[in-house]
Amino acid sequence: MPPVHALRSWRWRRPELALLLLGVVLRLAALINLDPTWGYDSDGHYQYAQWFTSHWAPPPITQFFQAFHPPLYYAIGGLILRAGGQFPALRAFSLCLGCARLALLWLGLELYLPGRRMARLVAMALAAVLPVALFMDVTIGGEGLQNFLSVIVLILGPWALRARGRQRWRLAAWLGLVLGLCLLTKISGTALFVALGLAVLAEQLVSQTSAGERLGRAAPFALSLGVALAVSGPLLVRNIRLTGKPFPTSFDTVQADQQASVKDKPVLDRRSLGYVFLGSTEIYSRPFWPNAIAPNPRFFPVLVAGTFGDYLNYGYAPRRAERPGDIISNFSPARREALIPWRLSVVGGTVIALTLCCGWLASLRALWRRREVERLPLLLAPPLAIAGLLYFTIAHPFDSEGVIKATYVQFGCAPLYGLFGLAVESLWNRGRGGRVLASVALAALALVAIYTFVCRTLPR
């Protein structure tokens, strides 16, 4: 039998368990009213996985649209299909990864926010109901595996930076292995390398020890890089040989003709300043494609609408046949019953995003004052992920291809759940004025939750 203190510990964590269960139940509910073939480029992802039912090597990089992606997710999908699975089985794999990611997130919150229970509970609540994360967890594609692996990296990174001696080397080796698997899943994993590299550099700069000791502390992360390259190196070499780039995109392969139209223009000239710095009000009344894209594209409004809603209208609110008077978005009717909660969720998401910006700045200031570099990867991963997507959408200004997808940045955004929880808890503890602001943030979270509950209970 488990010891009594362990039972008491689990009883004490019943709210956390309830929120974890809520996230799992919401994802299971999607099996009822969300078709397994819905989701971004689902047919292409399935085609890639089918390749591995009759081959053991990746396809030629121009074989089909999705072939530029690294092969790990699709190789696993091919094994599932070889065992007799179909579309629903691949979705079940995504669902298992999503639920495991929620459990790992809880572990990370326990490790890095000890004694901050309110923050942990708010963070778990946001993770359970966030539309983009839930939709990603019940559709097929490499994002689910990438996000699962990335949470492991974000747990191991600060732990390795804090460790000493042999433990540091062991953790660095495991870190390199998981980073290598990330690169075999999605090219976006490079942002995690940068976050960890900057943290190692910051440790060198703030340390008061001798140069030899500082180099000794950095050496294990050279092992991380070596292991990661050993795992992913053959794929990178193949990509360079075929395309001249270690991380090609579709615009370097099957869509190269589109890139030809802008390749002679400097990258920073391909978008206006308004694309980066201006907002959009229409996104709150019509939070779906093509608003805030045509005629004047805006990056951050679309990113917020895609995070807290279903900007591309791919079926988060279950699809149905078109009726007279329907609003058509991306060739499908926007579900009327979900429209008001949808709008309110994007409003709430804007409040959450502003809260996160303030919380991120406050946390960065606190880490700087304490010279605490161990947690720096947790702060750097989200902005680096967003900056990577911003650069990609500026370099490839083809909005009809849906280049601004909130799913693309989720791999680096796990720390934002904890930051939102910390911001709410800190405001709550600041007296009456702070509690008012914390209540506004919690009300915004409630709007997002209502939208998710509505979408998961609508009939197909």
Image: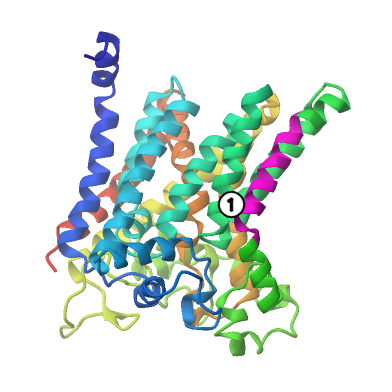
Q: Residue at x 20, y 71 (%)?
A: 336
- Please name whichever residue, 393 or 155, is drawn nearer the observer in this view of the structure: 155
> Where residue 211 sits in the image (x, y, percent)?
88, 27
Q: Quadrant of the C terminus?
A: bottom left
> Is 409 placed above or below 433 here?
below
Q: Residue at x 66, y 31 (%)?
A: 169
Whether 303 is among the magenta residues is no
> Where residue 94 sits in the image (x, y, percent)?
33, 57
The image's colour scheme reads rainbow
Residue 100 in sight in this render: yes
Whether 221 is among the magenta residues is yes
The quarter of the picture where residue 308 lies is bottom left
The rendered magenta stretch, by its main secondary structure, is classed as: helix
Left or right side of 454 for 236: right
- Please name whichever residue, 257 or 274, is drawn nearer the observer in this view of the structure: 257
> Where residue 129 sits in the image (x, y, percent)?
30, 48
Single out the residue that lies furthest toward the top.
Answer: 4
Q: The disc labelled 1 sits on which kind of residue?
A: Gly
Q: To which residue does mark 1 refer? A: 180
Q: Residue at x 69, y 26 (%)?
A: 369
> Is 377 placed above or below 145 here?
above
Left or right side of 286 for 383: right
> Where residue 59 sits in the image (x, y, percent)?
50, 76
Residue range highlighted in magenta: 217-233
The quarter of the picture where residue 256 lies is bottom right
Q: Quadrant of the N terminus?
A: top left
Q: Residues within 10 Å of mark 1 (few under 14, many from 20)?
A: many
> Is 392 placed above or below 193 here?
below
Left or right side of 2 for 137: right
- Please name whichever residue, 448 or 283, is drawn nearer the observer in this view of the structure: 448
The quarter of the picture where residue 76 lies is bottom left
